[in-house]
């Protein structure tokens, strides 16, 4: 759950306050060192972000932990969101082809960009709206029981969501079901470099226990090096994307992405 303060502030006021803070931050951090492709602005640095739980460092979880230069001051994109952008820009037809896209728990920066593309039929969905500043047109749904027809979408973006879902395998089967043949999905999660097998314990329901065990109060597992095989077990064909392997890291060095993070792209 989010802070009680967010639940008390009316949605319209919360959006205005957030927008005001973003504008102020943009001025404070203005410069020419780093660049955010979502808001198309340059900064002297990004804001720090991420959790700081000891288990994150013990298990060497990529995509988690406290990071300098993580959060864009203006649109709040994270390093992982900017990694997604590189794939969308360099390896997809997102900006040109007519596509129907399902966006799970839509990040504001990604939503703002994709929902404005005239070639995209954009369908956002999330389980909880209360206390969050999701756009009000976001559909309430559960990805373990997606209320759409088989083969309904060309593209799915589900970025750092599955680590929150108790029955993630059911969610993956549902995501596979609603994806069209020939379609693709970004199914990104934080992954441990040292765990061969995903660690989960359904008895841990207390927020403190989950933070201690999984690195964040609302996470229910730590994915291991078997994550790719979990995706493949429901039928996906997995093609990891890494800017370094594609000789793109130097081109996008001022995006401040994590050079260790690999993007998991699954095809049907």
Image (tube, rainbow, N blue to C red):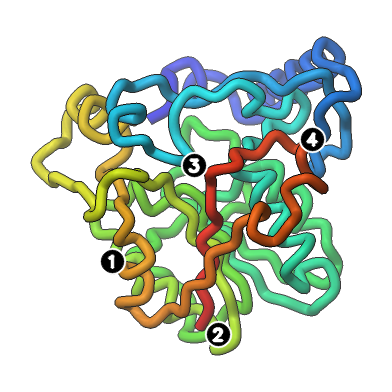
> Which residue is at a point 60% across and 19% down the rendered structure image?
48
Give the number of the mark in front: 3 or 1.
1
Task: Determine the CA span between mark 2 and mark 1.
Answer: 19 Å
* Residue labelled with disc 1: 169
Is residue 139 visible to the viewer in this orientation of the structure? Answer: no
Are there few (<14), some (14-19), or many (20+) residues within 10 Å of tag 4? some
Q: Residue tagged by mark 3?
A: 129
Q: Tell me residue 188's x, y (percent).
A: 49, 54
Is 164 situated above or below 36?
Answer: below
Tell me the SS state at disc 4.
Answer: helix
152 to 265, vertically: above or below? below
Residue 230: give x, y in percent of width and height. Answer: 31, 68
Assess disc 1: are there few (<14), some (14-19) or many (≥20) residues with their C-alpha within 10 Å of its C-alpha: some
* Picture residue at 82% right of the left edge, 72% below the top: 119
Q: Badge 2 is on which residue?
A: 180
Tell me the mark number nearer the camera, choosing from 3 and 4. 4
Kindly report the distance in space between the C-alpha atoms of the residues bearing marks 3 and 4. 33 Å
Q: Which residue is mark 4?
A: 254
- The secondary structure type at the circle numbered 2 is strand
Q: Are the residues at dot 4 and dot 2 in contact (C-beta closer than 8 Å)? A: no
């Amino acid at each position: 759950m989010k802070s009680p303060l967010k639940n008390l502030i009316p949605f319209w006021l919360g959006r205005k306050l957030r927008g005001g803070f973003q504008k102020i931050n943009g001025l404070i951090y203005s410069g020419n060192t780093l660049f955010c492709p979502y808001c198309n602005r340059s900064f002297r640095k990004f804001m720090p972000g991420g959790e700081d739980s000891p288990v994150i460092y013990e298990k060497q979880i990529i995509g988690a932990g406290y990071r300098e230069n993580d959060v864009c001051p203006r649109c709040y994109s994270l390093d992982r969101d900017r990694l997604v952008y590189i794939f969308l820009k360099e390896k997809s037809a997102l900006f040109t082809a007519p596509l129907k896209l399902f966006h799970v728990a839509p990040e504001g920066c990604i939503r703002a960009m994709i929902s404005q593309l005239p070639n995209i039929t954009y369908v956002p969905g999330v389980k909880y709206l209360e206390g969050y500043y999701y756009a009000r047109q976001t559909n309430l749904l559960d990805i373990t029981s997606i209320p759409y027809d088989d083969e309904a979408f060309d593209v799915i973006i589900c970025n750092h969501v599955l680590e929150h879902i108790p029955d993630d395998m059911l969610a993956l089967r549902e995501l596979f079901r609603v994806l069209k043949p020939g379609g693709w999905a970004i199914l990104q999660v934080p992954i441990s470099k040292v765990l061969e097998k995903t660690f989960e314990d359904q008895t841990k329901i207390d927020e403190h226990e989950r933070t201690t065990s999984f690195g964040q109060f609302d996470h229910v597992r730590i994915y291991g090096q078997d994550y790719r095989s979990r995706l493949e077990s429901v039928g996906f064909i997995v093609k990891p994307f890494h800017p370094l392997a594609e000789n793109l890291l130097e081109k996008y060095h001022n995006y401040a992405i994590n050079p260790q993070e690999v993007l998991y792209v699954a095809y049907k």
